[in-house]
Image (cartoon, grey):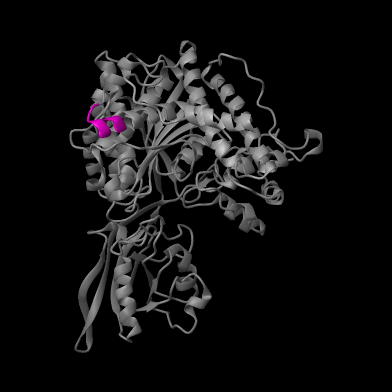
Amino acid sequence: MLKFVMTIGVVLLLAAPAAASESPPLIDEAAAAAIAAEVSGSAAKRTVQAMAQHHRMRGSRGYDAAADLVRDKLSQYGLKEIQTIGLPADGKIFYGTQRARPAWNASFAELWEQRRAGDQWVDSERVGSWADQPISLAQDSVNGTANAELIDVGTGSSDADYAGKAVRGKLVLISGQPEAAAALAVTKYGAAGLVSWAQNQKQAWWGDDESLIRWGHLDTWKDPTFAFMVSPARARAWQTRLARGETIRFRAAVEAGRSAGQYRIPTAVIPGRDRTKEIVYSCHLDHPSPGANDNASGCSGILEVARTFNRLIAQGRLPQPLRTIRFIWPCEIECTISLLNARPEFAKRTLATIHLDMIGGNTEVTKSNLQVEGSPPSLPSFVDDVGFAIARWVNAETLQYSDTGASKWPLLDPEGEKRALQAEVGGFSGGSDHIVWTEGSWRIPVISIADWPDRYIHTQRDIPENLDATKMKRAIFIAAAAGWYLANVTQADIPRLEASRQSEILYQRADMYRRIAIMPAEEAALIANRQAWGERAEAASFARFGLRPLMAMDDPGMLLGKAADEAIIYHRLARQGPMDGFGYSWFDDRLQRAGLPRPALLDRAARADAADFAYEALNLVDGGRSVEEIRAHLAATSGPVPLAEVADFLATLLKLGLLER
């Protein structure tokens, strides 16, 4: 017991926050200094301002304008092999598990509240306008008109919401997302259209500002109709008037629809001496206007990395990288799944991906913290440690500057704030394109850099003015320094890399000891066993880059579970992407076709800082792990889970033809 306590103390001491240092970790100091001096948060923010003008829905004219902006910037910066990949998207084509959604465009949409003038109703106040605020029209709305009263039906997603209410030909006010209500409101009960004040992206500040209009969605495939999005404040005012017995009437007109189009994906490279291996920078280009932090900031961030590298190489301040560096601007998740299926050479060449999604929210305004995360627990990699080490160093340097006014590496932007970065470092969470790269189909390690939460995400107030140029500079520096290191790391760098990796292992062990201190013995054993497995697997990850650890490591082997000859073991037949894309769920579609119940594992909530159960369960299927071992991995990383739920989920995938025994 004494030895155990002392071990915890030593680990916690060694894993204390890094002290400020004159030298950055891993990356050559001269290279780091050149990158730090060149990277500009202000320049990236100006690009955000230009990009935020476009309502960037997949396949739309606004998205195409943003893609052209990226292309033109790349040409201006002198990048090589600039192209915009066009993948047909007509609603019928499949790219792996992603059904390619048709392009969606709107040209006009207005919602007017009317007042009675004699025996007529005339327009009184315009409460929704595509021209003024595109976010006020729900995505995938179609052509329609209405001159109709407003009826409040609550959430609008159950038959009980419509009981005793005559909604045919009326506009229905709903508090839920339009896609959840359209089948009942429009298709079944005959409403003329929807007006929604749906809220999403719940966090601590959710609901504080009732003037926010949030992004709304209709199903791409079902129940064609239109929906306007309004703020809770406006909806509550209408509810009060309706409760008094007042008639509220609107005139609605929408010109919008879906048509065959393209997923357009700009890309360019900085050629390396080795053209067969690439380090990829990714983001996602789509989202409603203004969409400044989400995700014009990430898109502008990797543009700034591209400009910085290319300029420094042209000036001779950085050499040509050993490995090629590629930059990609897809639409979120669906374009990434489509690209990796349509162009398998991209995944084949990629050693690691650095993904930027929301990198600049001014913490005092948006309440967001920068999070630097890595690959899921099913994919241990030294790549994570590179990002973590650099981020912890930036934290320490900027904290020293904030505390004392002096630091060799303050990483300030002249138009930005001076507070410490205080990024949250470590772990894995989903929610963006990095989950496609790490998914079991491709198993490409990632460094993910993203803000969370952001009180204005997916609203009309996600504006460029909310961004901090200093925070953007620091996030871009972390991404650039990590990517440059990965593009150039060789066997000669292994001693220093191993030392840094051991430091990160101490952080992980400290977290492990904190967790197992309050766990039952069986669960504690799982967590400790998984930590040991992860350390061995991470050492084995060097081979991906053609590198060798200083000390040979045994094969990671099994975690816990029955021997192979006693256990159920699955092999994945198709490697085509995640089961749930954006706007289309392969899994739910196949379940419905097969008439199978939805497995309970899909609805089990993982720990807040952990990977999704179902996502990780499929990632862990490798033709060698038993169901029992997969359950053990999940219990050690995502949270307690019954073996029966894991077995049922995998058996369902077997019935759907994705796995074989």
Q: Is residue 556 located in the magenta-colored stretch of the structure?
A: no
Nearest the viewer among 654 and 476 is 476
Q: Position of residue 431 (x, y in %)?
A: 46, 46
Q: Position of residue 95 (x, y in %)?
A: 52, 42
| Quarter where residue 169 is shown | bottom left
Write down the region rendered in magenta.
398-406
What's the residue at 29%, 70% (across, down)? 234
What's the residue at 26%, 26% (across, down)? 407
Nearest the viewer among 644 and 73 is 644
Q: Position of residue 649 (x, y in %)?
A: 66, 49
Q: Main secondary structure of the magenta part?
A: helix
Q: Is residue 656 above or below residue 206?
A: above
In the current view of this chain or complex, which residue is farthest to the front? 2
Q: Is residue 229 above or below residue 45?
A: below
Residue 342 visible in the snapshot: no
In the current view of this chain or complex, which residue is farthest to the right? 566
Nearest the viewer among 301 and 549 is 549
Nearest the viewer among 390 and 506 is 506
In the current view of this chain or complex, which residue is farthest to the bottom? 119
| Quarter where residue 416 is shown | top left
Residue 274 as seen in the image, left or right of residue 79: right
- Quadrant that contains the C terminus: top right
Residue 169 visible in the snapshot: yes
What's the residue at 71%, 42% (across, down)? 627
Circle count:
0
- Quadrant that contains the N terminus: top right
Q: Position of residue 333 (x, y in %)?
A: 45, 43
